[in-house]
């Protein structure tokens, strides 16, 4: 079994787009180890689109790594990444061309899967641009799912059809280990909030072996790079990271890990948040509130070992009082129980009966791990 908890790693796209190279990937892998990100659980180093020449090799039919960007080829890069105890990810597309107009894997699925296996690839992100309309998207993911399974190597299949064709209804059957269920994230608060809001009724399909992928994080980008746009502030990034963890989805970093600031590093290595994300039970969270109307969202999730996670998210530009009435998550007054909270982010600690109320600063969040206690 390849994927019992949500995959964690780093991907080139959000910051670097097409400006990728062997050197960038090696330096990032070095930094993932030195900064403690590897020890925190980030293991997949993934090259996104734009790594190949514009056409396949006419003799072999294979996709060819761009010799200017990757002069030593992909096998050498994979070896370097493996020697660091990390795993190596690459990108292709179910269509004839990738989203940035490089060769896609349509009708070359088995050849490409074998090639990736020979190079030592451990993870394949599989996009959806330029796919022929006469074949159902579902069949294209079935093909690559099967091609990877038969490639002779364990390769995590990261499907990326942006939530088309109600992907959550069928993707698990293709052998995929994670599936993008939304359009592309950009580095603004609105973007990550909309992604979460759009997924509140879709996380039932996420679980061990096949996780809902809410896209690569923009945490720590501060507006720099390919999807940088306006950027977020530190409170937004706390909220984004905590939301991804409470949703139990893959944590793929998108910032430049070589120059990431200390505050971001502390956040993305936060052990309690990562433990929530990686919880062994992989449960769907409960969502309470009306984020569109009130600009707040409350998330509650059952965890392994008799614990619960609670997050209050304030999407508004002003501070807000937020509360949880315990009976709304099933802890009725007749139980004689309350919750004891261990603070994770913000100020949410102590014992409470019936309800808890907390002040959440503008755009920020409060997160705690809870246990039920007799009061
Ligand atoms: C699509 C995907 C992105 C990224 C780009 C690359 O837009 O959704 O995550 O992989 O293609 O071109």
Image (cartoon, rainbow, N blue to C red):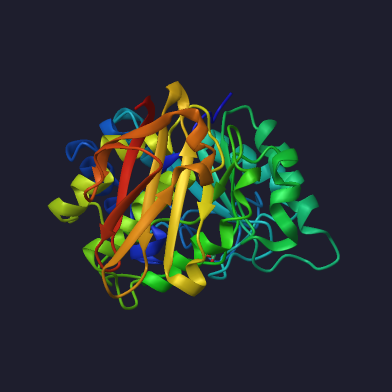
Q: Residue at x 24, y 64 (%)?
A: 361
Identify the image quadrant of the C terminus: top left
Q: How many marks?
A: 0
Identify the image quadrant of the N terminus: top right
Q: Nearer the viewer, residue 43 or 132?
A: 43
Position of 313 compared to 33: left or right? right
Can you name the residue that lies furthest to the bottom here?
A: 230
Residue 369 at x, y percent in the picture: 34, 36
Compared to 291, does 344 lie above or below?
A: above
Can you name the residue that lies furthest to the right here?
A: 134
Residue 280 at x, y percent in the picture: 48, 27
Position of 349 compared to 17: left or right? left
Q: Nearer the viewer, residue 70 or 100?
A: 100
Q: Residue at x 40, y 39 (%)?
A: 309
* Residue 42 shows in this picture: no
Q: Residue at x 53, y 34 (%)?
A: 282
Compared to 317, does 346 lie above or below?
A: above
* Residue 256 shows in this picture: yes
Compared to 341, does 362 lie above or below?
A: below
Compared to 96, does 272 lie above or below?
A: above
Position of 19 compared to 157: left or right? left
Can you name the residue that lies furthest to the left here?
A: 262
Q: Residue at x 69, y 64 (%)?
A: 96
Residue 237 image-quadrant placement: bottom left
Residue 194 at x, y percent in the picture: 50, 68
Position of 66 compared to 112: left or right? left
């Amino acid at each position: 079994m390849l994927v019992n908890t949500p995959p964690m790693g780093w991907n080139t796209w959000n910051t670097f787009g097409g400006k990728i190279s062997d050197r960038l990937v090696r330096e990032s892998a070095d930094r993932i180890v030195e900064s403690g990100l590897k020890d925190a659980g980030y293991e997949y180093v993934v090259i996104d689109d734009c790594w190949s020449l514009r056409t396949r090799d006419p003799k072999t039919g294979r996709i060819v790594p761009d010799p200017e960007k990757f002069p030593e080829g992909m096998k050498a890069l994979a070896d370097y990444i493996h020697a660091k105890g990390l795993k190596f990810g690459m990108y292709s597309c179910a269509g004839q061309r990738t989203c940035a107009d490089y060769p896609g894997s349509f009708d070359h699925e088995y050849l490409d899967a074998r090639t990736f296996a020979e190079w030592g690839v451990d993870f394949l992100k599989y996009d959806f641009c330029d796919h022929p309309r006469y074949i159902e998207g579902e069949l294209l993911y079935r093909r690559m799912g099967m091609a990877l399974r038969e490639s002779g190597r364990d390769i995590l299949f990261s499907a990326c059809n942006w939530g088309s064709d109600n992907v959550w209804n069928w993707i698990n059957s293709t052998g995929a280990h994670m599936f993008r269920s939304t359009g592309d994230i950009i580095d603004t608060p609105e973007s990550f909030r909309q992604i979460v809001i759009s997924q509140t009724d879709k996380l039932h399909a996420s679980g061990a072996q096949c996780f809902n992928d809410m896209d690569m994080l923009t945490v720590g980008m501060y507006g720099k790079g390919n999807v940088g746009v306006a950027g977020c502030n530190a409170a937004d990034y706390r909220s984004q990271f905590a939301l991804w963890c409470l949703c139990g989805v893959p944590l793929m970093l998108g910032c430049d890990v070589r120059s990431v600031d200390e505050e971001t590093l502390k956040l993305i290595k936060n052990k309690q948040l990562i433990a929530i994300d990686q919880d062994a039970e992989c449960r769907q969270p409960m969502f309470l509130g009306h984020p569109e109307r009130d600009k707040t969202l409350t998330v509650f999730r059952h965890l392994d070992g008799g614990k619960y996670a609670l997050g209050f998210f304030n999407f508004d530009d002003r501070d807000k009082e937020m509360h949880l009435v315990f009976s709304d998550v099933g802890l009725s007054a007749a139980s004689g129980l309350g919750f004891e909270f261990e603070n994770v982010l913000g100020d949410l600690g102590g014992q409470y009966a019936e309800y808890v109320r907390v002040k959440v600063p503008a755009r920020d969040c409060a997160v705690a791990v809870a246990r039920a206690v007799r009061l």
